[in-house]
Amino acid sequence: MIPAAPAGLQPEPVPATGVRWQQLWRDAIRDPAELLALLGLASVVDASAAAAAQFALRVPRGFAARMRHGDPHDPLLRQVLPVDDELRLVPGFSLDAVGDAPARAGHGVIHKYEGRALLVATGSCAVHCRYCFRRHFPYADETAAAGQWQASLEAVRADASLHEVILSGGDPLSLSTPKLAELTEALAGVPHVRRLRIHTRLPIVLPERVDDALRDWLLGLPWPVAIVVHANHAHEFDAGVDAAMARLRTTGATLLNQAVLLRGVNDSVDALADLSTRSFDAGVLPYYLHQLDRVAGAAHFEVHDDEALRLHATLRQQLSGYLLPRLVREVAGEASKRPL
Ligand SMILES: *Cc1c(COP(=O)(O)O)cnc(C)c1O
Ligand code: SF4
């Protein structure tokens, strides 16, 4: 997702209801040994207990099923497996890598760029990505604090320059659909809001989240909607994800993908080209290819800028223009993402 500091809106714990995606959420793999055994890698790969203690492993079973059995270098596995490399202290890699803390405009609202602001809807995610800023904010484990939505809405209402609200987190679709509906009903009363954007990895990692209730909620929204999913590798798409995207498209939402350039995951022309074409096959247009946020514990994922530019230049030759993501970096204090 978009990096965001822990903020006023606290996550609700996923409630124990009969909703299928919530059952799958709770059934996620949390034990690195179990994941490695499932993949036939128990005697081949060591997970790092110390890294897992800092930021727990969490991966939905359906996502794990897309990993290649017996491949210790699987690009999906690398995104979620705690490893000792995370414990290295590397100069330049810090806790608030993108300067969110100074950009807080109100409870749960981060306003950095003109016309649009992030609303931090929740801290919870269905998957824990090792390269993510969230590793330093264990706020997903806190309990819900009632009454905080109001402060976020007030911040949006008070600034008439805000035409787009971006639901972010964590993963905003980890909130229950009734909770999302509560939020958007309140937002609908703010006249200067004209667009809604949702940054979410859930349709990729737990496509069952895109159920009838979610579709109905999206269909009922009063604004044009953009949904930015987050897939880093073509293997993250399967038939279930295709079905989820097809269903999202029936709501009229525009579907975009943002990826992070990650060493050992997608740092080759072939991997990036496959990601773009596979996304498009699912009805999703490439949006951003992000250079890694320099978050402590993620240095082993970094791809040097020269290499990133070389990859991007080759991609430009190979892909149709609309399949080429914009290569950007987030720089604290700047007025937009910075093109490389
Ligand atoms: C990335 C980001 C956005 C969205 O930027 P776009 O270039 O419009 O995708 C908005 N607000 C914040 C705080 C962000 O970090
Ligand atoms: S889904 Fe992964 S990348 Fe997105 S906010 Fe959660 S942990 Fe970070």
Image (cartoon, rainbow, N blue to C red):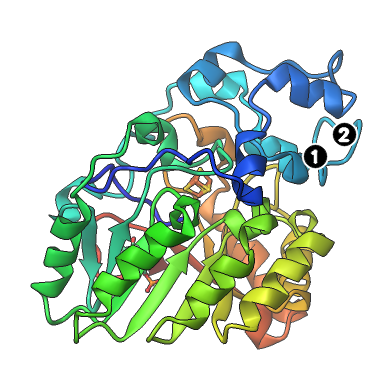
Residue 6 figure quarter: top left
- The percent position of residue 284, horizontal first and vertical second, equals 66, 76
Vertically, is 179 above or below 247?
above
- The percent position of residue 106, horizontal first and vertical second, equals 13, 56
- The percent position of residue 139, horizontal first and vertical second, equals 35, 34
Numbered mark located on residue 74 in the image: 1
Tell which of 300 and 254 is nearer to you. 254
- CB under 8 Å between callouts 2 and 1? yes
40 relative position to 127: left or right: right
Q: Is label 1 in a helix, a strand or a loop?
A: loop
Residue 171 visible to the viewer: yes
Numbered mark located on residue 112 in the image: none
Tell which of 324 and 210 is nearer to you. 210
267 relative position to 186: left or right: right
Real-space Cα separation, disc 2 to disc 1, in angstroms: 5 Å
298 relative position to 154: left or right: right
Q: Residue at x 23, y 53 (%)?
A: 108
Q: Is label 2 in a helix, a strand or a loop?
A: loop
Q: Residue at x 69, y 52 (%)?
A: 267
Label 1 is placed on what type of residue? Asp
15 relative position to 247: left or right: left
Label 2 is placed on what type of residue? Asp
- Count every numbered label the image shows and give the total: 2
- The percent position of residue 209, horizontal first and vertical second, equals 62, 57
Q: Residue at x 30, y 78 (%)?
A: 164
Classed neighbour count for the residue bearing mark 1: other residues with Cα under 10 Å, few (<14), some (14–19), many (≥20): some
Residue that numbered label 2 is attached to: 71
Classed neighbour count for the residue bearing mark 2: other residues with Cα under 10 Å, few (<14), some (14–19), many (≥20): some
Q: Residue at x 70, y 46 (%)?
A: 265
Vertically, is 153 above or below 306?
below
